[in-house]
Amino acid sequence: MEFLIVGYGSMGQRHARNLRKICAKNGLSCSIDLLRTRSTDAPEGIRGVYTSKDQFPGTYDAIFITNPTATHYETLVDLIELSGAFFIEKPVFDRTDYDLDFLDREEKVLYVAAPMHYKPAISWLKEHFDFSEAFSLRSISSSYLPDWRPGVDYRKTYSAHKDMGGGVAIDLIHEWDYLQYLIGFPERVHSIIAKRSDLEIDSDDVALYIADYGDKTAEIHLDYFGRVPLRKLEIFTKEDTVECDLLTDTISFLKAGEQIVLTEERDDTQTRELEAFLEMIQGKRESTNDIEHALNTLILAKGCE
């Protein structure tokens, strides 16, 4: 199979690594090209590096859009005729008002990254937990932006700049993504999205939401300034309080005193997601997070009711 990766940051590198692993396991050929803003030597495992689509050797089985969020739309428009399948990193776009009339949704596989769907703890909850019993949920994702990319000045990353698609509200859209996966879209949302810390960024560093689902409520807290990483989902029911630690994939039933510990190796979640994406390309399953669905999630994250 032939793949093109646009951008080669941490996610582009991870996808390349996982594609080679999956193809090798399934006895498939795997050729990976890169589209970058400047010419470089091909990294190990990469066939070619290009700076323009005019240089491509042909079309591709799938194109991965992993460049900064603010460039996703123009990249998709520019490359739409070169593949029948696109894997777009989250969030899908930096805005919700782009013209999508150029897309042939019937003929193209259009998938927006949703790795939390494939995380062991979320998968367990999706399969085994009855959310009709939940009165309320509380989700938090808190971490310190300068620690995200060791050796990289956080002030120069896209996360630090609103015009590049940065800001905690859409950078940490995963929390909204897994909540809608588990319990659907809310009826109403109230939000506060702001810059509150002393981080040297011009994007928002905290986003708070209260969502009304009619029969239940949900709270979401996202920030760039938490000095101790936290990523949890708490579920409040009549019989128990359930705490799901998404950093350790541990689900604790606090009143019952029971605990479920799920384990995985590095890259396992993204590998399962890519395996599902390849099945979408082969027509074995439908896209579980297409552009329309991802845009609805983005509307929630940006605080648009």
Image (tube, rainbow, N blue to C red):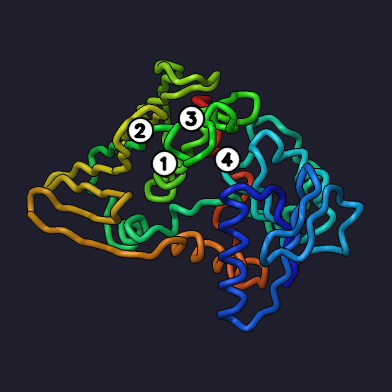
Q: How far apart are marks 4 and 3 (CA)?
A: 10 Å
Which residue is label 1 attached to? 175
Q: Which residue is painted at 56% across and 65% down in the image?
A: 18
Q: How far apart are marks 3 and 2 (CA)?
A: 10 Å
Look at label 3 and name its amino acid. Ala
Say above or below: 293 vs 1.
above
Residue 156 locus on image (x, y percent)? 59, 29
Q: Which of 242 and 24 is in front in this view?
A: 24
Q: Distance between the residues labelled 4 and 1?
A: 12 Å
User: Is disc 4 in contact with disc 1, using a CB cutoff of under 8 Å?
Assistant: no
Which residue is label 2 attached to? 220
Near mark 4 (Cα within 10 A), the count class, few <14, some 14-19 or many ≥20, is: many
Look at label 2 and name its amino acid. Ile
Mark 1 or mark 2, which has the lower sequence index? Answer: 1
Q: Quick check: 160 left or right of 96?
A: left
Near mark 3 (Cα within 10 A), the count class, few <14, some 14-19 or many ≥20, is: many
Q: Quick check: 198 left or right of 102?
A: left
Which circle marks residue 169 in the picture? 3
Q: Which residue is painted at 18% across and 44% down in the image?
A: 237
Residue 185 locus on image (x, y percent)? 45, 40
Helix, strand or loop status at disc 3: helix
Of the 4 image quadrants, the one containing the N terminus is bottom right
Look at label 4 and name its amino acid. Pro
User: Is disc 1 in contact with disc 2, using a CB cutoff of under 8 Å?
Assistant: yes
